[in-house]
């Protein structure tokens, strides 16, 4: 009987990640840590391939200062004056947070969004940066957004 209870309440095995953290997944399988968008940046993929990968994998943003205003949850984006930051994966977002100077205790949340986020918001007054301050940094240009828009219409 105790063996059955142990199996019932046993946590799946943890998986040691490249950054040293341990991740537990519900099914016990290692998490998918591939980052096709960052890989495309590293090999200077064409605009069409870059847009296709953005469309397939979406982007992540970092939020802080989450709070409720009435029935809505609101937060501040983590970005810089004249720039808006998006990330190709949770790992790239975590790498970025490690570069932020510590001025106090701040909790950050990473939100995964589909690529429509890039098309339904106006970034014309700022530079849109993928994976800032990292080895996979790339500006997302107006041409990239147009390619993303056209590819989604096919």
Image: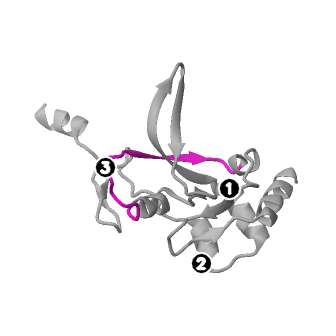
Q: CA distance from mark 1 to mark 3?
A: 36 Å
Q: Is residue 103 above or below residue 76?
A: below
Q: Which label's residue is closer to the chain start, 2 or 1?
A: 2
Secondary element at image label 1: helix
- Residue picked out by circle 3: 104
Which contiguous range is marked in magenta? 98-115
**Residue displayed at 35% across by 68% down:** 18
Q: Is residue 138 above or below residue 63?
A: below
Secondary element at image label 2: helix
Q: CA distance from mark 3 to mark 2?
A: 34 Å
Residue 43 numbered mark, or none: none
**Residue displayed at 56% across by 52% down:** 60
Provide residue 34's location: percent of width, then percent of height: 51, 65
What is the quadrant of residue 37 in the picture? bottom right
Q: Residues within 10 Å of mark 2 (few under 14, many from 20)?
A: few
What is the quadrant of residue 65 in the picture? top left
Residue 56 numbered mark, or none: 1
- Residue picked out by circle 2: 42
């Amino acid at each position: 009987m105790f063996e059955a209870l142990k199996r019932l309440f046993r946590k799946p095995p943890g998986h040691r990640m490249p950054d040293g953290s341990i991740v537990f997944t519900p099914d016990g399988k290692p998490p998918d840590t591939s980052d096709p968008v960052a890989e495309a940046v590293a090999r200077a993929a064409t605009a069409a391939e870059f847009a296709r990968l953005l469309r397939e994998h979406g982007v992540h943003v970092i939020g802080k200062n989450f709070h409720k205003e009435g029935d809505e949850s609101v937060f501040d984006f983590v970005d810089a004056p004249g720039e808006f930051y998006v990330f190709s994966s949770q790992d790239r977002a975590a790498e970025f947070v490690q570069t932020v100077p510590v001025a106090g205790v701040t909790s950050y949340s990473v939100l995964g969004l589909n690529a429509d986020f890039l098309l339904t918001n106006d970034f014309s007054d700022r530079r849109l940066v993928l994976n800032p301050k990292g080895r996979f940094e790339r500006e997302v240009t107006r041409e990239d957004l147009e390619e993303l828009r056209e590819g989604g219409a096919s």
